Each structure stands twice: as structure tokens, then as C-alpha cells.
Amino acid sequence: MRSRKTLSTVAIGASLTLAVSGCAIQENASSDAEGVTTLDFWSYYQGGQAEWLAEEVKSFEAANPDIKINVIKTVGDQQDQKLLASVATGTTPDLFINNIVVDFPTLAAGGVFADLTPYWDDLDDESQFPTAAVWKDGDAVYNLLPFTNLVGMYYNLDILSEYGITEAPTTLDELQADMATVTADGKYKGLALSGAPDVEGAWLFAPQLLGEGINYCNFEGPKVDEAFERLDAWADADYIPKAAATWDQNASWQQFMTGGYAFAFNGNWQLGNVKDADFAYGTALYPAPEGGTSQVYPGGEGFGIGSKSEHPELAWKFIEHILTPEAGEAIFESAGSIPVRADAAESPAIQSDEFVAPFVIAASDPGTWPNNENTAKMQTALGVEVSAVISGQRSGAEGAANAIKNVADAMAEGGGGC
Amino acid sequence: MTQVTTARPAERVRAPRPAGRRSFTKLPLVYIVPTLVILLAFAAYPMFVLVRMSLSDVGPSNIIGEWPFVGLQNFVDVVSGSEVWASTLRTAFVAAFLLCSNLIIGFLAASVLSVKGRLTTIVLGIMVFVWALPPLVSGSLWKFLLDDSGAVNAVLGVFGLPSVSWLSEPDLALWSVAAVIAWASLPFSILIIRGGLLAISPDVLEAAALDGAGYWRTRFQVVLPLLRPTLWILGILTVLYAFKSFDFFYVLTRGGPGTVTTTLPVQSYNEAFSNFAMSTGATIAVISMLFVILIAVPYVRSIRMETTE
């Protein structure tokens, strides 16, 4: 009897001790006995971008021995969900990256970001950054975009040469003609692109309309029908494989790198990876629709500080480090991303690179994202229809009609603003 | 000494009993309370939050604030749309596919594997390995195998057959994903059915043999009826599995191409975590849960009947 009581008391005591000490350990987790503060950084970077971040962390820690950056690898398409959940539990990371294309309105509404306004106002190099680099909600600065990523066109020079094509297509009609040429004998495929039924499918397709002045805020009319009809025709002619209907951007890139595709729509973040290609390659602007211009949406990762961070000043020191021209040039070297600060973008290394030139041009006049809480839903609505048309689930006309309706519905649900 | 021991046995035996009984009656509480706390914290409370969310207007802007109560409006919105019914049909298709594969193939395979031998041991070992594989791992493997230029199409090519878009052909994608899920769930079914087969008395089988029944006749006319309770429970578990299956869809198709593989769990996930329409996602999850409850009731009843028997 006594031994049972003793056992129970010990068990309960041990549980309480564990619980209390667990809390205590967690309380002190960010600073060790030597006064080194550890900042958690949630990052979903991969490949060249991850290598760049690791180098920046290394150089930052060398310059700031009292701060350690703990880079925690996350999954890209789960980042926003985890961040929203972390606000509810009071455990936001000190630092994080986020996909501005999709996440910013949602994360700002969810209270994930710390207010960076005072830090930003005190920054000496503020004038080096364009307005598009500073993401605000109201007057408050929440998110900073040190470099941008945009989509463009990659082409396999070996395949084009084999069929006597000497210049990269500049319009969608030229692209269609070239795809017809290179796929005629069945040896090669036409275009590798992501047609996933989500934001990625929308991101790759939207420029076909953007160049004609159609964006998410005025998404309707015959031009939308024409774009979907063209996509349908490309899928029917097998210029785009059906499998593209489920490919994300990484999957479509792997396909292009096999050497079996003449063209690929993908982003400048692949400039670092394309060097591994076993074939000669080139880059070009996203082909313009007939009578329109080549225009794409700006993308990239915003850097933010978690609203529950206990060390926002130290976290800002790291963001300052990321905003330097050296860090901007390094991300270009490492992953092909284009720094947005003027002095870094004008560096000889970037200006003289023929492969990055189309992306630099595209970055000078990008499209404008809608300012609506349902931005993600609007893109998903488009992506689902793109995927459906590529796979043959729907005709071009059906896809266009659905996309117009669903984008409008999503915009209305998000408050109607744009 | 002898007198003492013989004079007091009744007292000595009687005295500790009440105390012992008390401690015995208290003992279950020590086990029940932690279980109850864990159940409330990790099952009942999240379910309560889910239902509350489905009855409220929740989005990213107020997920950590007040949730305005909207009654059944979310349910009206969801069931008045066509997509949720299409998702329900797709989920039902997956359930039907799994029922066929788990019960029919499962029974045939278990019959073969109920014969003891080294080969059986090896096959059972492989099946346990397949069963234990995380769906994200086996799903990625199948995505690679079923790709247009994957191993499956390469094999077809050897026989001069054309390549098939297993995961992106609208008429085929749901079949392909259902087949992968069936592949992953089959080992569990085989192990369960095999357990039931081995529990059947050899005397019954011997009697059937003496009456002149062959192997397969014995299987279908003697063994199968005896397995009915096991197959009934397995069938219900299979349907429940279909209604909660999400991982393979996420890895293989993400609900696409278009929406052809969007089942109830996928639609719920997309609404809640891609579109951030938390209430809509929760409402679809609750609808899915209602289906599961409808199926779970006979399951619980059959378990009770089994226990009573």
C-alpha cells in the first residue's frame, strides 16, 4: 500500500518536475550561458537559395558572435499554415521567409508579422530600394523583398538548332510555330511548364493575359477565352504533355533538364541550376501575346520578423545583413535571383550576364498583384482551370467560363477590393 | 504460537480486505483519468473546435480573435454548391474500389498465405514492410513509377504498348490513385483475414475434406461464411480509411488534374489551407465526419456483438 502511494507520489512529482523544467528550458532556449542568443529562422529554400542563405548566416554569425541563426527547414506550401498556427500558440519564429505572391495578405491579416516600420525608417540605404520591395498593410511596413523572382522562358538551343530555328520566339504565336516544328517528328516535346491545380499553374499561365492588360482585377472578356482556347489547342497538339496538369515548377524543371523539351516556362531561380544542363541553353522574355507586351507578375520571398519574437532588434540586424548589396550580389551568383536594390542590380556581374538579362528587363515593368485577402483563392481558381484544360477534363471555353466566374467569386468573397 | 495462529485467522484475513478492496476500486481511476484527459485534449477538444469553426465565420484575419456565430449558413453554402457532391461521389468511388480490393484480393491472398512455409514468411515480411511505409514515401515512389516516362510506361513500351498518362488523364487519374491506396492498404487486410483464417478450427476443414469438398470449395462455402464477422469489420474499417485518405492524393495529384481527384479530405484541406476559407474547410470536414459516424455506428455495434459472443 505504502509502496504504491510512494510510487504514485514519485510519478506525479516526476511529471510535474518534467513539465516545469520543460517550460523552464523552453523559456531559456534562445540564450545560452555564454550570452549567445539563438534566433529561429523558418526557411523553405532549396538548392542554390538554401546554399546562399547558409553562407549569409555564416558571415552574419562571424560578424555577430553573440547571435546564432538556427535555420529550420520547412515545407514551402505549408509555411503559411504553420505561421498562422504559430501566432495562435505564441511561438512565431524570430525570422521567416514567405511567398509574397500568395501569402502576404493572409499573413498580415493573421497577425504573423512584427511591425518593421521603425527599423525601416532608420535604415540608411532606404532610398536604394524601390517601392515594390516594401510590403505594407496600411502605413505599417511588415515585409521586405531583398530580391525578386520572375518567370521567363528557357530554351534548349541544341534542339532549336537541330530544326533550324535560329532565334528564340518573342510572341506566343512564334512559340506555337516553333513547337509545331520541333514536335512534328515526335522526337522532342514542346513546352515543360507547371499546370498544377493551384497557384503554380496560375502563376505560369497568367502572363499570357497580363501582356494584354488582363489581370485578376478585370479577369473577363474574349481575351480570356482566347488564352484558354490556345492552351487547349497546345494540349491537344501534345505540345504540352497531359502530365503537366499535375506538375509543380520543380517537376516541370526536371523534365526540361532531361533534354527532351525545346522550351520551358520557369523562374530566374533556376539560373543557378540550369548550368548543370547537358545541352546548350538560352533564356528569353516570356513570349508576348499578339498585339500585347511581355509582362509577368513579380515573385520572390519576403523577409519578416515574427510578431511573437522576443528579439526583434536582433532579428532586424540579420535582415539588415540580407539587405546589403553584397548579399544581393551573392544571391544572384548563387541562385540567379535579381536583387532589387539599385546599386546591386546595376552591378557589372548582373548587367553583363546574357542569361539573366531577360529577367532584369521583366523586373523593370512587372504586373500588379491584387490587394485582396482572397488573392490565393483567386489564383487557385485560375490554376484549377488551367490544370483541367491541359488534362482534357474541360474544353478551353469551359475552362475560361469557370475561371472567370470563380476568380470573380473569390474576389467578391475577399471583400471585392482589388 | 499454534493457538494464536488458529484463534485469529478470521480476523487476520478479514482485516486487510476492506483496505485492499478500496485500493483495488481506486486503481482503475489512476488509469482512466490520464486516458480521459488525453482523449479530451487530443480528440474531443479538436472536434469541438472543428464543429464550432463550421458554425462560425473564420478566416485568417480572425483565426486568433472572435469567431462570429453564423449558425448553419456554412453548411447551406457548401451543400448548395456542386463541388462537395462531386467530391463525395469520388470519395465513395475510392471506398468501393478499396472494398473490392481489400475483401476480394485480400481473401484470395490470405487463403494462399495461410499455408505455412518459408515463402509465406518472406511474403508476410514484405507486406509488413509495405504496410509500415509512410504514405508520403510510398506515394512519391508511385508518382515516379507512374510518370509519363516512368518505369510502368517503360514496361509497356517493351511490349510495344503506348505510354499512358496514369495520373493526368482525367478518366484514369482517380483509378490510379485508388489503386495506389489499395496497394498500401492490402497488406493490412491480408493480415487481418489471415488471422481469421488461422482461427478457424482445423476440425471444420477436416470435416469438409471428408465430405469431399476441394480446396476452393471449402474456402468459399465453409471458410468464407465463418469469416463473415471479420470481413464485416474489415469492410467498415476500409470505408473509414477511404473517407480519411488524404496523403496519397496530396503527393500524387494534389486533387488534380483539374478537380478529378478532389475527394472530401482533399477539398477540405484545399479550402482551409490553400484558400484560407477555414470555416468552409471545417464544414466539409464535419460533413465527412458525419459520413464516417454513419459508418462507425454499425462498426461499434458489431464490435459489441463480438464481445458479447
Image: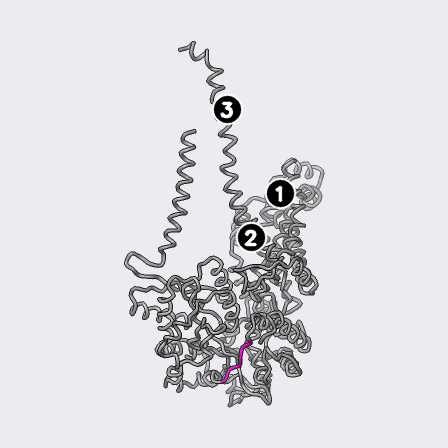
Which image quarter holds the N terminus of chain A?
Answer: top left
Chain assignment, label 2: B
Measure the C-alpha gap from mark 1 to mark 2. Answer: 39 Å
Q: Nearer the viewer, residue A281 or A24?
A: A24
Q: Quadrant of residue A369?
A: bottom right
Measure the C-alpha gap from mark 2 to mark 3. Answer: 42 Å
Measure the C-alpha gap from mark 3 to mark 1. Answer: 47 Å
Residue farthest left in this picture: A34
Mark 2 surroundings within 10 Å by alpha-carbon count, few (fewer than 14), some (14 through 19), many (20 or more): few
Region rendered in magenta: A365-370
List the residue tagged with mark 2. B46
Q: Residue at x 60, y 71 (%)?
A: A415
Q: Nearer the viewer, residue A28 or A380?
A: A28
Name the mark on residue B197: 1
Q: Earlier in the sequence, mark 2 or mark 3?
A: 3
Determine whether, in the image, residue A150 is placed left or right of residue B54.
left
Which image quarter holds the C terminus of chain A?
Answer: bottom right
Q: Earlier in the sequence, mark 1 or mark 2?
A: 2
List the residue tagged with mark 3. B18
Mark 1 surroundings within 10 Å by alpha-carbon count, few (fewer than 14), some (14 through 19), many (20 or more): many
Determine whether, in the image, residue B163 is placed left or right of residue B25.
right
Give, as a three-letter code, the residue at label 2: Pro
Do the CB atoms of the residues marked 2 and 3 lie less than 8 Å apart? no
